[in-house]
Amino acid sequence: MKTWLPMTRREFLYNSGVLTAALSARTIQAEHGIATVRPLDGTTLAKFVDALPIPEVLRGHGLRPSPKDPAVKIPYYRLQMKQAEAKLHRDLKPTRIWGFNSTIPGPTIEARSGKPIFVEWVNDLPTTHLFRIDHNLEGAEKDKPDVRTVVHLHGGRVSSDSDGYPESWFVPGKSNVCFYPNTQDAATLWYHDHAMGINRLNVYAGLFGLFVIRDQFEDGLNLPTAEFEIPLVLCDRLLDQEGQFVYPVSPDPIHPWVPEVFGDVVLVNGKISPHCEVKPRPYRFRILNGANGRFFHLAFAHQIEFWQIGSDQGLLSAPVRLKMLTLAPGERADLIVDFSKSRGESLVLKSDHLDVMQFRVSGTVSAAVPAIPKSLRELARMQESEAVKTRELLIEETVDAADNPTIMLLDRKRWMDPVTENPFLGSTEIWSIVNGTEDSHPIHLHMVRFQVLDRQNFYVMNYLRKRELKFTGPPVAPDRNEMGWKDTVRAEPGMVTRIMVRFDGYAGRYVWHCHILEHEDNEMMRPFDVIPRS
Ligand code: C2O
Ligand code: CU
Ligand code: CU
């Protein structure tokens, strides 16, 4: 049994109360110049008073000719990024947000495996940003427009020109059409802003939503569907007394960037700690951690067991029984929760000290439902011998005299340094992510799916000085719910996390990065090139 929970060091301090008051009060003062706006203590808001909303499923805008064969017509969707107001809680005034079609989260896009679609992403935002921009960050210099966006489909196997490259941003009044082939297994993907240097601010404002791919195999499993399949998009936020989002800034007015942000309210599908009426039967929940920096540790207050059936890139080989689910920023989990033994009860889903939401189980007896299948999708474990190359990639954090992080680097390189990760199309590689920091970093690669091989403790000082790996313990197998296809993996502190990646799909330029958005915006992101075979 593990005794510690993966999270960042500052999140730990925050959760244990050391940082709470200090960080939020000070930074909010700095944000507003004078201390006129007081932070709202999110824990004082009434819990479970709003009903859980379900994001709307996006409707198409007709058909367009396929890029490959104009005789074939493909569904066309359009989403507008807009500034709007959202009612996050019964007792709060409406909150200014940026949302796709004016909602947080945006509408859900439903796709079928093998059936391509177009999405036109329209930037209809104002030209002034909701939050303070740090012009010292790469790509967010003073000569760049404050408001710019580009949308990435996280988990999508997409050609590079539709992938949402961070520098391919566009300004208000412009739009961009992406082609999503959906030639991949059923999975819960999500779309979100990815604009260079301000990604953390755009996502915090509300620019994200779900993109679900389904397939025939999954249909055949008889999993709970329709009203019994519920998406739960999680994120945390800080608010002021007026109910507006607060994005904290550092005490240094010239460098407003902060290393991490933790809110004291949890939003589920855009409502603060809502409730959901359920029947005493199994439900399927597709959960996304859409937070900037918070790791969720989801568990029911009554320690009820549940089953995980899928991870980032789709179904596991068999359901995994859990009492607690750790979900790092960017990760997804597909769960089955059976409420049939909780008739008439109210169950609270928590994450550490936070109340995430409440389920109110009705007292009615419901008709018999199919049992959870014993096995799901067949899944071959990749063999190390398949790898043609191993890359050792260091995660490093630079701190100032006061131990505050100033920059986060991948392999001691900045965004602008020449591309060093250049796998051949179709080749398989092992990436050994050597985490020399004291924090857990969720590492994400675009375009591909991968398997987690293992994690192993190493002698950090020795590596930082001599770049020589000395292990201090045996390799540890991934958790059972990490044995499926992933696109985001927790690189744990002081450990080498090895993943095995086949670069199937498309040649071209992509990115890999830490999904703590504050890190990503401050150099913890690197381009990689998939090289075509000649
Ligand atoms: Cu969730 Cu590079 O993205
Ligand atoms: Cu991605
Ligand atoms: Cu990180």
Image: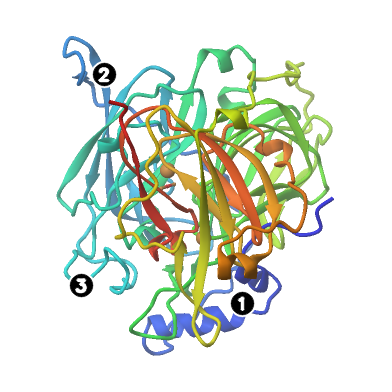
Number of numbered labels in the structure image: 3
Q: Residue at x 39, y 46 (%)?
A: 421
Q: Is residue 204 left or right of residue 98?
A: right
Distance of label 3 from label 2 (alpha carbons): 40 Å
Please tell me which of labels 1 and 2 falls first in the chain.
Answer: 1
| Horizontal and vertical percent position of residue 413 | 39, 62
Q: Quadrant of residue 415?
A: bottom left
As shown in the figure, which amino acid type bears the numbered disc 3? Answer: Lys
Distance from label 3 to label 1 (Cα)?
A: 32 Å
Q: Is residue 404 above or below residue 381?
A: below
Which residue is found at the position 63% from the left and 68% from the top? 462
> Going from the N terminus, do you reach mark 3 or mark 1 first?
1
Q: Is there any visible trace of residue 388 in the rendered image?
A: yes
> Disc number at residue 20?
1
Determine contact: label 3, label 1, CB under 8 Å: no
| Residues at marks 1 and 2, CA–CA distance in whole angstroms | 50 Å
Is residue 60 placed above or below 56 in the rendered structure?
above
- Say above or below: 242 vs 422: below
Q: Which element carries disc 1, helix, strand or loop?
A: helix
Which of the pair 240/488 is nearer the observer?
488
Q: Residues within 10 Å of mark 3 (few under 14, many from 20)?
A: few
Residue 142's label in the rendered image is 3
Q: From the viewer's side, name the closer residue of 233 and 196.
A: 196
Indicate the quadrant containing the C terminus: top left, top right, bottom left or bottom right.
top left
Q: Residues within 10 Å of mark 2 (few under 14, many from 20)?
A: some
SS class, disc 2: strand
